[in-house]
């Protein structure tokens, strides 16, 4: 039986710019990005993903430059979705557009208390083998969101705490891969979180990402089957991924790195099958 293609949500970068600072990567980048180059890079990522998945889009909106980062639209599991409530006030006007998109596309939406910070699939990632959600806190998502997520999705939440403001969402430093592999940058997490990760992921399934690769957003990758799409990876990291059975596709995303995002940030996987 043929497996249905994954469906991935993206948003064209028509209004993308870097003109405020809400994470360390943005410092000094204001006004330095090229919209033409951003459009070209986004198109190359979309085209590469479309070879293996169905890409659907949400309309970009004027004055909402970060809407391009659809990973932060919300978290999806089966036909349920939890829309984000952004910690930075600059991104809060995006919320109504993403909520409307989820409703219009048939998702059952949780009405999360707007006093609780939660930034979607930036901080809530489905393990690719175990029946749990890796869920971050520390900078953009608050621990109070975790019980709400667990109850609504009826799925165990494993809380992991970020400690380095450069890695403000877990998807900047942590990437669950097909068949239970995990690509991650351990220094981004506190001791208890590293223990939780190591308890659940056996050593041969852990792909450790060093400081240089983490700084190039190697963990912020899109995984479709045995393919990994990312901005840049060192030769040793590519070799480790290939040894684990993955094909690596490098796609230049320099303009989005200036805003603190890369391949994964620019996508939201809409087909998260229910665990048995």
Image (cartoon, rainbow, N blue to C red):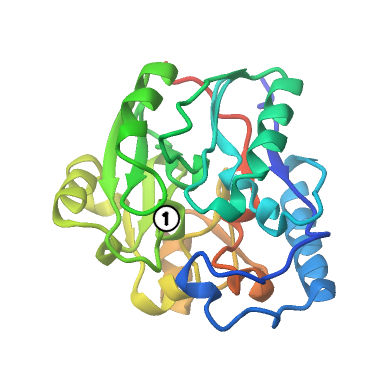
Residue 107 in view in this figure: yes
Residues packed near mark 1 inside 10 Å, few (<14), some (14 to 19) or many (20 plus): some
Q: Quadrant of the C terminus?
A: top left
In this view, 133 is above or below 276: below
Q: Residue at x 51, y 40 (%)?
A: 120
Q: For this rendering, which residue is in front, 22 or 109? A: 22
In terms of depth relative to the viewer, which is nearer, 129 or 39? 39
Q: Position of residue 176 (x, y in %)?
A: 42, 46
Q: Determine whether 188 is above or below 92 in the image.
A: below
Can you say whether 132 is above or below 123 in the image? Answer: above
| Total marks in image | 1
Dividing the picture into quadrants, the one containing residue 199 is top left
Q: Secondary structure at mark 1?
A: loop
Q: Nearer the viewer, residue 12 or 199?
A: 12
Q: Is residue 196 left or right of residue 11?
A: left
Residue that badge 1 annotates: 244
Residue 224 point in image, percent of width and height: 60, 45
Percent from the top left, x then y, of residue 159?
27, 39
Q: Quadrant of residue 151?
A: top left
Q: Quadrant of the N terminus?
A: top right
Percent from the top left, x then y, of residue 257? 59, 71
Which residue lies at the image location 68% right of the left edge and 34% below the top edge?
Answer: 96
Q: Does residue 224 appear anywhere in the picture?
A: no
Residue sitting at x 76%, y 68%: 41
């Amino acid at each position: 039986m043929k497996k249905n293609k994954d469906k991935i949500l993206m948003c064209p970068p028509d209004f993308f710019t870097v003109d405020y600072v809400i994470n360390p990567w943005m410092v000094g980048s204001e006004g330095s990005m090229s919209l033409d180059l951003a459009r070209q890079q986004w198109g190359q990522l979309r085209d590469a993903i479309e070879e293996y998945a169905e890409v659907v889009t949400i309309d970009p909106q004027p004055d909402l430059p970060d809407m391009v980062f659809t990973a932060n639209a919300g978290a999806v599991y089966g036909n349920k979705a939890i829309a984000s409530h952004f910690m930075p006030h600059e991104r809060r006007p995006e919320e109504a557009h993403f909520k409307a998109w989820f409703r219009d596309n048939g998702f059952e939406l949780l009405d999360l208390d707007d006093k609780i910070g939660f930034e979607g699939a930036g901080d809530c990632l489905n393990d690719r083998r175990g029946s749990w959600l890796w869920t971050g806190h520390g900078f953009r998502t608050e621990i109070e969101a975790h019980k709400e997520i667990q109850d609504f999705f009826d799925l165990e939440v494993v809380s992991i705490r970020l400690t380095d403001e450069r890695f403000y969402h877990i998807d900047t430093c942590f990437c669950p891969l097909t068949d239970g592999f995990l690509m991650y940058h351990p220094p981004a997490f506190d001791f208890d979180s590293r223990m939780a990760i190591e308890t659940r992921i056996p050593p041969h399934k852990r792909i450790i990402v060093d400081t240089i690769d983490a700084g190039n957003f190697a963990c912020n990758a899109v995984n479709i089957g045995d393919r990994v799409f990312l901005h840049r990876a060192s030769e040793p990291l590519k070799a480790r991924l290939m040894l684990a059975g993955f094909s690596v596709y490098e796609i230049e995303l320099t303009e989005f790195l200036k805003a603190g995002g890369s391949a994964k940030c620019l996508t939201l996987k809409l087909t998260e099958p229910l665990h048995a």
